[in-house]
Amino acid sequence: MAIVGPVVTVKTDPTDWGTVVSAIEAASQRDVLFIDSSGSNVAVWGGLTSRAAQQRGVAGTIVYGSCRDIPTIETLHYPVWAKGITARAGRPLNKGEVNVPVCVGGLVVKPGDLTKADVHGVVIIPSNEVASVAKSVKEILGKERFIERGIKEGHNLSQLLTDFPSRYPYI
């Protein structure tokens, strides 16, 4: 599964899934919920929240914390990325905040930032950098296509890299 969409942020207590319910109701179609529950091992996301978000048209959910009800979520085909999986459920305290900046691993995520999540992981693009990142991605893809064609034509990768200098050292 892969998703792309603007972020609706959630800052919640590590045991509070009530704020998550408020975020689902605040989200629009194709939004992505980004939940910061401090990396907790108590679930703030599960089968019922997945079903409610899917019904609302939410694109997917990213949880810096834990999730439960994995078989139900898989049956729904609802995209969820979580730091952990647990059977421990939180409570509907509703004491957190929706659509406020959150900081996870030193990265500040703001409401409206763009996210892409897939099998490789999660990327957050600040909303004011989307155009420049899109331009860079097009450049990288063009360089990779050039190198791929060269490999198919029998050229050595090392020579292709020399022939096509890049400011991206991982290409």
Image (cartoon, rainbow, N blue to C red):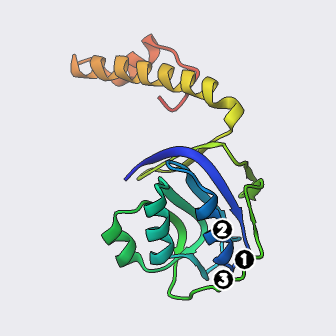
* Residue sitting nearer the eye, 112 or 117: 112
Q: Are marks 2 and 1 in contact (CB under 8 Å)?
A: yes
Q: Which residue is mark 1?
A: 94
| Residue 105, horizontal then vertical, whole percent | 71, 58
Seen in the picture, residue 144 relative to 35 is either above or below; the reply is above
Q: What is the C-alpha distance between the residues marked 2 and 3?
A: 10 Å
Q: Residues within 10 Å of mark 2 (few under 14, many from 20)?
A: some
Residue 38 in the image: state x and y as whole percent: 71, 70
Mark with earlier residue (2, 3): 2
Q: Which residue is identified by label 3?
A: 92
Q: Earlier in the sequence, mark 2 or mark 1?
A: 2
Question: In the structure shown, which secondary structural element does the residue marked by tag 2 occupy?
Answer: helix
Are the residues tagged 3 and 1 within 8 Å (C-beta)? yes
| Secondary structure under the numbered disc 3 in the rendered image | loop
Q: Which residue is mark 2?
A: 22
Q: Is residue 150 toward the left or the right of residue 89 in the image? A: left
Q: Residues within 10 Å of mark 1 (few under 14, many from 20)?
A: some
Q: Amino acid at mark 1?
A: Asn
